[in-house]
Image (cartoon, helix red, strand yellow):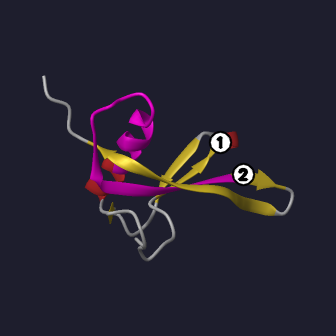
């Protein structure tokens, strides 16, 4: 999880690894199980839900399978989804 996205970094260069060809969403090993669940939910909500906090963000890397292996094509920072309230 990243605060104030500029210059943020973790042990990995990403919090989530997305592989579109296989539809995999893989949380990074440095995340706790709760953080992994929250990051995955934030990715699912991204672009579909306006209930976000921009103070907390996740770094997402999208990678594609190529003949030479996995190739990171895009890295973006997405806002953390806030818990839904009824």
Magenta highlight on residue 65: no
Label 2: element kind: strand
Instruction: Tell which residue pokes out farthest to the front in this image.
Output: 6
Between 17 and 29, the residue placed more toward the observer is 17
Measure how far apart labels 1 and 2 are at the Cα level: 7 Å
Magenta highlight on residue 45: yes
Instruction: Tell which residue pokes out farthest to the right in this image.
Output: 67
Q: Are marks 1 and 2 in contact (CB under 8 Å)?
A: yes
The residue identified by callout 2 is: 64
Instruction: Tell which residue pokes out farthest to the top in this image.
Output: 86
Q: Is residue 74 left or right of residue 36?
A: right
Tell me residue 58's x, y (percent). Answer: 40, 56
Q: Residues within 10 Å of mark 1 (few under 14, many from 20)?
A: few
Which residue is found at the position 36% from the left and 48% from the top? 79
- First-in-chain label (1 vs 2): 1
Tell me residue 16's x, y (percent). Answer: 48, 55
The residue identified by callout 1 is: 20
Which residue is found at the position 84% from the left and 63% from the top? 68
Which residue is found at the position 75% from the left and 52% from the top? 65
Q: How many marks?
A: 2
* Quadrant of res 46: top left
Q: Which residues are magenta?
A: 39-63
As displayed, is residue 24 above or below residue 29? above
Between 36 and 80, the residue placed more toward the observer is 80
Instruction: Tell which residue pokes out farthest to the bottom in this image.
Output: 11
Q: Is residue 40 left or right of residue 75?
A: left
Which residue is found at the position 42% from the left and 28% from the top? 48
């Amino acid at each position: 999880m990243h605060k104030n996205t500029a210059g943020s970094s973790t042990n990995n260069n990403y919090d989530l690894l997305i592989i579109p060809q296989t539809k995999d969403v893989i949380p990074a090993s440095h995340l706790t199980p709760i953080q992994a669940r929250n990051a995955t939910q934030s990715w699912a909500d991204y672009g579909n839900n306006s209930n976000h906090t921009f103070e907390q963000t996740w770094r997402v890397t999208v990678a594609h399978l190529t003949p030479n292996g996995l190739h990171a094509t895009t890295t973006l920072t997405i806002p953390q989804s806030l818990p839904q309230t009824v």
